[in-house]
Image (cartoon, rainbow, N blue to C red):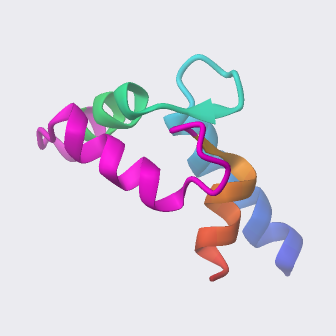
């Protein structure tokens, strides 16, 4: 069951990781929110969310950071 949940989480993460580099930036997050939700957020709002999940201080969100937040 956990593998299924992690696979689903990976698919969600990959949707936000537009360039496929394994990191979600504020710009990528902002673009996907606009596309999926039809709502606009500022880049600073997107960065604030990324920063809240970023544990290594690189101002990007890795899958590991995303997964940890989902399981926190």
Give the total of numbered labels: 0
Picture residue at 38% right of the left edge, 37% below the top: 29
41 in the magenta segment? yes
Q: Nearer the viewer, residue 30 or 51?
A: 51
Asked where in the image residue 60 lies, by quadrant, the reply is top right
Q: Nearer the viewer, residue 43 or 13?
A: 43
45 in the magenta segment? yes
Q: Which residues are magenta?
A: 35-60
Asked where in the image residue 39 lies, by quadrant, the reply is top left
Query: Does residue 9 appear in this view?
Result: no
Image quarter of the N terminus: bottom right
Q: Residue furthest top?
A: 19
Asked where in the image residue 2 lies, by quadrant, the reply is bottom right
Picture residue at 22% right of the left edge, 38% below the top: 44
Q: Residue 53, how many percent across, how many down?
A: 52, 59
Q: Residue 21, how many percent across, how many down?
A: 70, 22
Query: Does residue 32 appear in this view?
Result: yes
Left or right of residue 46: residue 19? right
Left or right of residue 60: residue 35? left
Q: Residue 12, how many percent across, how many down?
A: 57, 50
Picture residue at 67% right of the left edge, 57% below the top: 65
Image quarter of the C terminus: bottom right
Q: Residue 22, how many percent across, how many down?
A: 71, 31
Picture residue at 69% right of the left edge, 64% below the top: 67
Q: Is residue 18 above or below residue 50?
A: above
Q: Residue furthest front?
A: 57
């Amino acid at each position: 069951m956990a593998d299924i949940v992690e696979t689903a989480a990976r698919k969600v993460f990959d949707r936000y990781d537009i360039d496929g580099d394994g990191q979600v930036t504020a710009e990528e997050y902002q673009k996907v929110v606009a596309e999926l939700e039809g709502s606009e957020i500022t880049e600073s709002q997107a960065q604030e969310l990324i920063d809240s999940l970023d544990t290594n201080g690189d101002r990007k969100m890795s899958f590991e950071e995303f997964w940890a937040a989902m399981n926190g």
